Amino acid sequence: AQSVTQLDSHVSVSEGTPVLLRCNYSSSYSPSLFWYVQHPNKGLQLLLKYTSAATLVKGINGFEAEFKKSETSFHLTKPSAHMSDAAEYFCVVSESPGGGADGLTFGKGTHLIIQP
Amino acid sequence: GAVVSQHPSWVICKSGTSVKIECRSLDFQATTMFWYRQFPKQSLMLMATSNEGSKATYEQGVEKDKFLINHASLTLSTLTVTSAHPEDSSFYICSARDTRDILGDTQYFGPGTRLTVL
């Protein structure tokens, strides 16, 4: 069985400061891991994904995440927050070979607030 | 690339009526599409997996007779909420997997449909 824990329900940072959104997972197999972003009343946009290649994954809009197997973590970071980054972020894990069919498990989400 | 659309983006209906939501992959073919439900300030919950040309697979606790899913082509899946009630009010999101994606790696999500049942 797989599960995802997003450690913070809300994160507030000032514009221009670093962002850290924490995610821990559990999986019986080598998982695929994803971060999605959801702006208000919108669908989900894929930020980045890890599928057993490089452990440091670069995504869109300056975000990146590092897969740490020993810590079962996949934290999302960005060096400098922008006002447009304010949104809900979901960490997602899949045990399916490609994360496609029936294997997606969503974290509960982290609401990122950007202070001007 | 990999754009998924949903129609309508929002709908208001009376209790007891049926509502159809369309999910289309615009620039790729999708053998498999997925339907999720999201309550306010909560995460997404998978309702069903829709496979082109076959019956949908529903998650435990989801009434298949209430949430009818049809995946008639490689670019279109529909979700019909039958005899809708206020408790069916929610944000419905679909996603699709590109058939060319050998790893089956990624789901591309639609913008969602806000359903309000009066």
Image (cartoon, grey):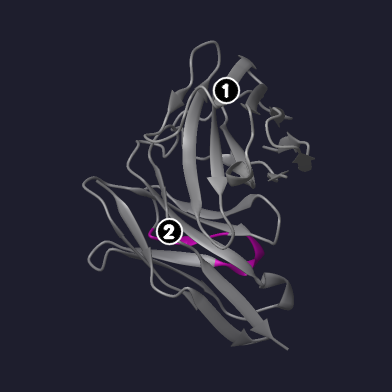
In this picture, is A115 found above or below B80? below
Location of residue B78 by image quarter? top right
* Residue at 67% across, 41% down: B110
Q: Which residues are magenta?
A: A55-63
Residue type, label 2? Gly
Q: Amino acid at mark 1?
A: Leu
Q: Can residue A66 be seen at all in this image of the molecule? A: yes
Separation of residues labelled 1 and 2 (CA atoms) = 27 Å
Residue A107 x, y percent position in the rendering: 43, 58
Q: Is residue A62 magenta?
A: yes
The chain identifier of the residue carrying mark 2 reads A
Q: Chain of mark 1?
A: B
Image disc number at residue B68: 1
Residue A50 place in picture, x, y as percent: 43, 52
> Residue placed at 45% from the left, 33% from the top?
B62
| Disc number placed over residue A107 in the picture, else none | 2
Q: Which mark is residue A32?
A: none
Residue A28 vertical position relative to residue B18 in the rendered view, above or below? below
